[in-house]
Image: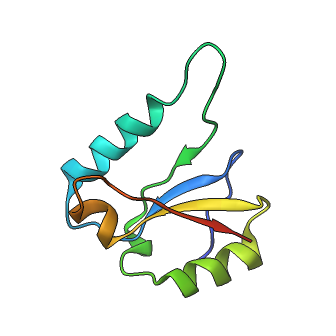
Amino acid sequence: MLKWPDTGNPVLLPTDFSDDAAWAALCKATQALSDEDFQANIDRVSNPSFDGLTVEQAMALAQKDSRHDFAFIADRSTVTDSEQPILAMSN
């Protein structure tokens, strides 16, 4: 049974595992969001069990299992678009 990751921070979760280099670039880019005045406190969770998960399925899992109010999803658009758009979802 698929369960939402239990982490200390909101998650950035890929649902498309077709491009490891794109995921690595996205992780690096999100780590670069931190500076002296701001810290992007998100946990990057890479679990192939979530491959192909739809937005609706992700939202249902997060609402059921997550203790955080929001999460970020890296879907097919994220790994195929050069601008790497991330889906932000609220529980």
Q: Which residue: 36% across, 35% down?
A: 28
Describe residue 71's horizontal placement relative to residue 86 as left or right: right
Image coordinates of residue 69 in percent, x first then y, are 77, 61
Picture quadrant where residue 80 is located: bottom left
Describe residue 23's horizontal placement relative to residue 55 as left or right: left
Picture quadrant where residue 46 is located: bottom left
Q: Which residue: 37% across, 68% down?
A: 48
Image coordinates of residue 72 in percent, x first then y, are 55, 59
Describe residue 61's horizontal placement relative to residue 22 as left or right: right
Residue furthest toward the top?
A: 36
Image coordinates of residue 70 in percent, x first then y, are 69, 61
- What colour scheme governs how the chains and residues are painted in the rendered image of this protein? rainbow
Describe residue 68's horizontal placement relative to residue 15 as left or right: right
Image coordinates of residue 38 in percent, x first then y, are 64, 24
Picture quadrant where residue 58 is located: bottom right
Residue furthest toward the front?
A: 83
Above or below 82: residue 38: above
Q: Which residue: 68% across, 73% down?
A: 62
Is 20 or 32 nearer to us in this picture?
32
Is 80 or 4 nearer to us in this picture?
80
Q: Which residue: 36% across, 81% down?
A: 52
Query: What is the count of numbered marks?
Result: 0
Above or below 65: residue 23: above
Image quarter where the N terminus lies is bottom right
Image quarter where the C terminus lies is bottom right
